[in-house]
Image: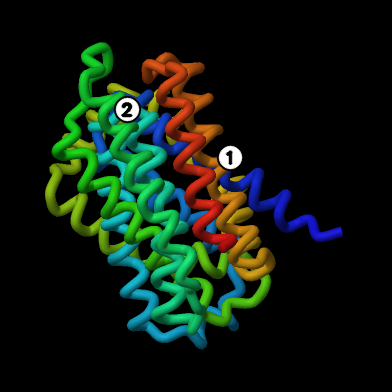
Amino acid sequence: MNIYPIIQFIGESTLSFYPILIKLTKLDVPFNTFIRLATYFILASLFSNYDIISNISIYKILFLSVVNIIHILASYHGNRNLNTTIGVPLFYVYPFINIILGILFLNETISSTKFLFIGPILYSIYRLYLNNKDDNQHKQNLKVGIPLILLAAFTESLIYITIKTTELGFNPWNSIFITYFFAAIIYTIHYFNSNKISEIKKLYYDNKPDVHKLIFANIFIGLFGYAFRFMSIKQVPTLLYTVISYTGILSAILFGAYFNLDTINGNKIFWIICLILSLIGLKIY
């Protein structure tokens, strides 16, 4: 029995909590980004295989690091400016971007029938936009949030393709290491250069319980989210990987409803399902 699809399902469901986490915490995005990068820096340093990592080009690692910083910042700011029912579905078009990058870098082919699904995908996104733009109950900024979420989706795909085409062995922490190690160093230097140490200390002591919860959440998501996703990238066929990726949409919507972060209605659910089916159809045909 191939357990990796199950592993990916758990990973995607766990990772889908990130859009919720950034909305629940009152800590600002730069500090959230610093905590996330530092946490994965430490975890990956503990579990990685350095013999394999030492063979990876330093330029590829630096590329992944910069892309990862952009990805996290775009994702955090984007999700803070959007409802869950528009931000999460938009972000999850990244498997669609995977197809395009797969054609460019993995020599994958695309049939003419795939183009039939582009219309339903775009129309479903448009309908989700209409269902969210007049929601005054939850503060959002569509003009800021939508471009940032699309940037987050694109950078997610760049990370996916780069990891998929790099020989990193079976250990998923190798992938996390080359994605987060230099990213953490670069961002930490930037963060401490932009903020006074006294201000950072005050931020920590004034919000100590929240900071500890944030660290724990990142550890949990790292262990059962990112590690499981990276573990499955090379073990799950691209088609099945893409389909399972969409489970993150549904779980994020459930998280959002549970924490009362969004207004959930039948129209939104209908168009989210239409989007998921259209993306699956695009991949299958």
Q: Which residue is mark 1?
A: 13
**Element type at mark 1:** helix
Q: Residue at x 65, y 46 (%)?
A: 9
Which amino acid lies under the numbered mark 1 shown in the image of this protein?
Answer: Ser
Quadrant, the N terminus: bottom right
Is 204 placed left or right of 198 in the picture?
right
Asked if residue 269 shows in the view, the reply is yes
Distance from disc 2 to disc 1, alpha carbons, whole Å, reads 18 Å
Query: Coloured how?
Result: rainbow
Q: Residue at x 73, y 58 (%)?
A: 4
Nearest the camera: 246 or 233? 246
- Place of residue 272 in the rendered image (x, y in percent of width and height, measured from the top left): 45, 34
Nearest the camera: 244 or 224? 244
Q: Which dot, 2 or 1, sits closer to the camera? A: 2
At label 1, counting other C-alpha atoms closer than 10 Å, the crowd grade (few under 14, some 14-19, many 20 or more) is many
At label 2, counting other C-alpha atoms closer than 10 Å, the crowd grade (few under 14, some 14-19, many 20 or more) is many
Q: Residue at x 45, y 70 (%)?
A: 112
- Place of residue 100 in the rendered image (x, y in percent of width and height, measured from the top left): 40, 69
The mark that comes first in sequence, 2 or 1, is: 1
Compared with residue 177, is residue 11 higher up or lower down, i.e. above or below? Answer: above
Q: Are the two marked residues, 2 and 1, in contact with CB atoms closer than 8 angstroms?
A: no
Q: Which residue is mark 2?
A: 83
- Place of residue 53 in the rendered image (x, y in percent of width and height, measured from the top left): 52, 79
Which amino acid lies under the numbered mark 2 shown in the image of this protein?
Answer: Asn
- Place of residue 129 in the rendered image (x, y in percent of width and height, measured from the top left): 27, 33
Quadrant, the C terminus: bottom right
**Element type at mark 2:** loop
Asked if residue 216 shows in the view, the reply is no
